[in-house]
Image: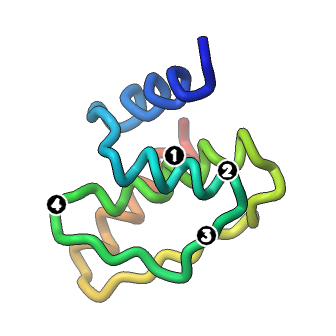
Amino acid sequence: MAIDEKLETYFQEITNFPMLRWQRRLFRELTENRLREALDLPTGLGKTSVMILWLLARAVNPALPKRLIYVVDRRVVVDQATKVAEDLQEN
């Protein structure tokens, strides 16, 4: 099974959603050490999944920074992102 197929499988197992094109593109960029300063997407497109993409990319590219800074401007998103991070840590 190719890395892309494994990624799709892991991502879907963790999130219960298939990957979107922007998520595949970001994963590829992360594995190639092409780091963005910011990610600006409309509500509902799975921005919280950046934590999962970063974690999976670190498994492929250990040179990726060990810390991910996640900044949002709404409390409900902070709560959701915290829950995702706690679930990732537990799993």
Percent position of residue 40, x then y: 33, 77
* Element type at mark 1: helix
Return the disc, 1 or 4, that comes first in the chain's sequence.
4
Q: Name the residue under label 2.
A: 31
Q: Nearer the viewer, mark 3 or mark 1?
A: 3
Q: From mark 3 to mark 4, how far is it between C-alphas? A: 21 Å
Tell me which numbered mark, 3 or 2, is placed earlier along the sequence.
2
Q: Mark 3 belongs to which amino acid?
A: Leu
Q: Which of marks 3 and 4 is nearer the N terminus?
A: 4
Q: Where is residue 49 in the image (x, y as percent from the top left)?
A: 39, 53
Mark 4 Cα shell of 10 Å, populated few (<14), some (14-19), many (≥20): few
- The quarter of the picture where residue 75 lies is bottom left
Q: In which quarter of the image is the N terminus?
A: top right
CA distance for labels 1 and 4: 20 Å
Per the image, the residue denoted by label 4 is 44
Dot 1, how many residues are within 10 Å of its Cα: few (below 14), some (14-19), or many (20+)?
Answer: few
The secondary structure type at the circle numbered 2 is helix
Q: Mark 1 points at which residue?
A: 88
User: Nearer the observer, disc 4 or disc 2?
Assistant: 2
Q: Which of marks 1 and 2 is nearer the N terminus?
A: 2
Query: Residue sitting at 55 percent across and 22 percent down?
Result: 6
Front position in the image: 78 or 30: 30
In whole angstroms, how far apart are the C-alphas of marks 3 and 2?
14 Å
**Labels 1, 4: front one:** 4
Q: Is residue 71 left or right of residue 69?
A: left
Q: What element carries label 3?
A: loop
